[in-house]
Amino acid sequence: MKSSLIILCLNEYPCLLKILPQINQSWFDEVVIIDGGSTDGSIAYAESLGFNVRRQSSRGVLEGIREGIATTQGEIIVFFTPDGNMLPEKLPVLVAKMREGFDMVTVSRYKDGAKSTDDSLLSAFGNWFFTHLVNVLFGSKFTDLLGFYRAIRRDIFQKTELEGFEVSRAINTQLSIRAWKRKLKIAEISGDEPPRIAGKSVRRIWFHGTMELLTILEEFFIGIKPIWFAINRLNRLFNSH
C-alpha cells in the first residue's frame, strides 16, 4: 500500500529547523506540508529542503486535514505536526505497523511506559478520564484516545462516515470510537510526547474538554438531538470570541 505523510503547519519556523531534517521523505510515497497561512518563513524554509508545500484555502486544523486528504493519493495516511510533540522516528514504525493489516494505528503517549512531558496536571487528568470513560462505555481498550499522532487507511473516513466531519466535533475521539464500533482493526504503538520546541498550544482546556465529553455522549446516545444541539451551540460561542 502506498503511504502519504500530511504535515500540518502554521508559523512553526523554529520547530521546523529541528524537526524537518529528521524526516526522511523516502519513508513515504509522498509527503505534503499543508500550511495554514504562515508568515514567519516556514514555507520558504520547508521548500528549501525540498518539501512540497500547499497553502490552505481556508484556516483551521480540520480544514487542513480535509485538504491534506483531498490532495494526497496514498492508501495509508499519516498525520503529523512539527511542533516537537511528535517523534519523527515513529513515522516509519507507524507505516510498518499499518502494513501488517491494520485500519488505524495510534502513537500512544501512555502505553508500555511511554509518557507525555508536555502534559499539565489538568490535561493529563483529561486524557486519562476521557480514555477510561470511552473504554467503560464502549468496551474498548484504548490507552490514548485523544492523541493526534496516528496513521489510518484512506477509506476509514468512508467506513466511519467521517468524510463530512464537522469543525465542532472532537475528531480524534470520534474517529477512534467509530472505528471501534465498526470493529475495524486498531493498534497502538508506544511513543513519548516531548514538550513543544517553541510557541504555545492553541487548545483551550475547558472548551475542548467539554467538546470531548459531548462528542463521547453523542456517540453513546447516537441520534439524541439535544447533544448535537449543545455541540453546535458551544462551537458557535467559541468562534464568536
Image (cartoon, rainbow, N blue to C red):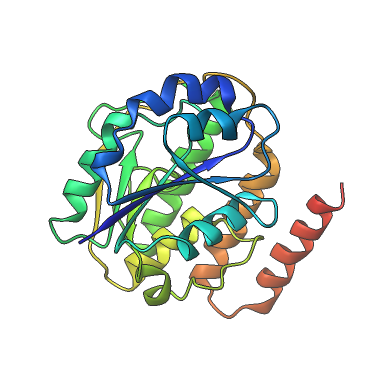
Residue reaching furthest to the left: 100
Residue 53 lies left or right of residue 101; in this view the side is: right
Residue at the spot x=67%, y=57% of the render?
57
Q: Which of 228 and 29 is in front in this view?
A: 29
Residue at the spot x=26%, y=46% of the render?
188
Count of labels shown? 0
Residue 136 sits in which quadrant?
Answer: bottom left
Find residue 159 and report its horizontal and vertical position in percent.
37, 76
Asked whether residue 146 is in view, the answer is: yes
Q: Locate the N terminus and report the quarter of the image it occupies.
A: bottom left
Residue 127 lies left or right of residue 152; in this view the side is: right
Find residue 29 and report its horizontal and vertical position in percent.
27, 51
Q: Is residue 147 above or below residue 71?
A: above
Residue 42 sits in which quadrant?
Answer: top right
Residue reaching furthest to the right: 241
Find residue 104 and report its horizontal and vertical position in percent.
30, 57
Q: Is residue 149 above or below residue 65?
A: above
Find residue 119 and report its horizontal and vertical position in percent.
50, 26
Residue at the spot x=62%, y=31% of the render?
201
Asked whether residue 124 is in view, the answer is: no
Q: Which of 178 and 60 is in front in this view?
A: 60
Q: In this view, does 161 lie above or below 213?
A: below
